[in-house]
Amino acid sequence: MRADTEDYFLHPRPGSAAARAADFGTDLTLTLANLRLSPEQRIRKLESFIEGIARLKTSLRLIGPTNASAKQHN
Amino acid sequence: MPALSNIIEAPLRLLGEYKVDCVIVGGVAAAIHGSLILTNDLDVCYARHATNLDRLAEALRSVRARLRNAPEGLPFVLDAETLKRGLNFTFTTDVGDLDLLGEVLGVGHYEDVLAGSVTVDLFGFRFPVIDIGSLIVAKRAAGRPKDLIALPELEAIQEAQALENRTES
């Protein structure tokens, strides 16, 4: 990754598309981390994330509203 | 249910193995360009010449492709003739979901999309991927909230790519 590309995302110039994305709420440090990967690695990362979300969905169990006075770990 | 660990890789390998002429578009194309956009199906814009429709139908049959969300028992013959009669198809297959687009909104048919594409090596195959400028045009034309929300990041990636190209030339 070239230094000026890193700089583009880490220190967006006012008026740039990166600055608009940052204002929109995009975390450009994550985008930059993704850009450091090869296209194939980006797809594998996406698949891994999809798999993780699916695992989370199958493992979670809704207990109910959290009682603020109760301890989280008993 | 297909293995989620290669829900995008496996359909891509399928298209590569059957030598289907197509361009990767949609969320996977955005991810290839570096976007953090989330998607769990593969969208491709496919060539509609007879040989390609034959290859495509054969590839789809090999993974027991069926229309997504179609009523159970709906008669559907998966062959080149059926693909020729339709344009856009959404399939569930044994290896993952695959959407076939005969046309990309705002960009055009396969030949138009191919003209604005870049080539990438993926999983041992060479694929054209819609270039970021055309992808932005397509997302803007689609105009759904999920497309529009992707635009600021894609435009930043586009500007970074332009910056790199400018300083290289």
Image (cartoon, coloured by chain):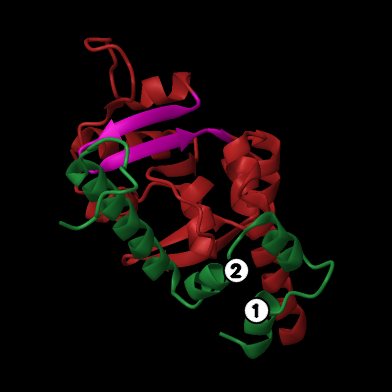
Q: Please indicate, yes or no, whether residue B73 appears anywhere in the rendered image.
A: yes
Q: Residue furthest left?
A: A74
On the rendered image, what quadrant is the N terminus of chain B found in?
top left
Q: Are marks 1 and 2 in contact (CB under 8 Å)?
A: yes
Question: What type is the residue that disc 1 sits on?
Answer: Leu
- State the green chain: A
Query: What residue did someone put label 1 on?
Result: A10
Q: Residue furthest right?
A: A15
Residue range (magenta)? B87-103
Badge 1, how many Cα within 10 Å: few under 14, some, many 20+? some
Q: Please indicate, yes or no, whether residue B23 appears anywhere in the rendered image.
A: no
**Between B135 and A24, the one nearer to me in the picture:** A24
Question: What type is the residue that disc 2 sits on?
Answer: Leu
Q: Position of residue B109 (x, y in %)?
A: 61, 37
Residue B100 on the magenta segment: yes
- Relative to B131, is B62 above or below? above
At 54% across and 63% down in the image, what residue appears? B33
At 44% across and 68% down in the image, what residue appears? A39
Colour of chain B, in one word, is red
At 62% across and 33% down in the image, what residue appears? B144
Indicate the secondary structure of the residue bearing disc 1: helix
Q: Main secondary structure of the magenta part?
A: strand
Q: Position of residue A2 (x, y in %)?
A: 61, 87
